[in-house]
Image (cartoon, rainbow, N blue to C red):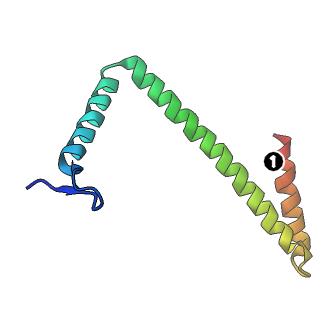
Amino acid sequence: MPITEGRPDSGHTKVNYERLGKAVEDALILDYIYVLHSTRRQVWSSFVRGLFAGLGGVIGATLGVAVLAAILGFFSSTPVVGHFFTRVGQTIENRSTSK
C-alpha cells in the first residue's frame, strides 16, 4: 500500500514517498552506470576524490599539530615537567615550519 501523505495545511498536495524514493534511487543507479561505462569519467572521479582526500588529510594534520602545540603550551608552566613540554612544543613548531 503506497504511502500518500500531504501537508496538514493544504489538502490538495499529496506526495507519494515510495515513488519519489524509487525515482531518486533509479537516477542514482543510472548515474553510477553512466560513470562506470566511461574510463574518462572514472579517472576524473578518482582524481577529484583523491584530491579532496589529500586536502582533508593536510588540513586535519595541520589542525592536529596546532592543537597539540597549544595544549603543550598550557603545560609549560608546570614545575616538574614544564621544561620537557616546552622543548617538545618547540620541536613540533620547528619541524612543522621547516617543511
Q: Which residue is drawn at 85% across and 67% down?
A: 73
**Furthest-bottom residue in this view:** 79
Binning the other alpha carbons within 10 Å of mark 1 as few (below 14), some (14 to 19) or many (20 upward) gives few
Q: Which residue is drawn at 84% across and 62% down?
A: 88
Q: Which x, y percent locates residue 69?
A: 80, 61
Q: Is mark 1 on a helix, strand or loop?
A: helix
Which one is nearer the viewer's eye here, 61 or 13? 13
Q: Which residue is drawn at 74% across and 55% down?
A: 65
Locate residue 19 relative to residue 27 in the image: left or right. Answer: left
Q: Which x, y percent locates residue 36?
A: 32, 25
Which one is nearer the viewer's eye here, 36 or 87? 36
Locate residue 54 relative to residue 3 in the image: left or right. Answer: right
Q: Which residue carries the number 1 mark? A: 96
**Furthest-left residue in this view:** 1
Please state, as top left, top right, bottom left or bottom right, where the N terminus lies in the image: bottom left
Looking at the picture, which amino acid does disc 1 mark?
Ser
Q: Which residue is drawn at 24% across and 50% down?
A: 13
Locate residue 63 relative to residue 77 in the image: left or right. Answer: left
Picture quadrant of residue 81: bottom right
Q: Which x, y percent locates residue 91?
A: 86, 56
Q: Which x, y percent locates residue 30?
A: 26, 30
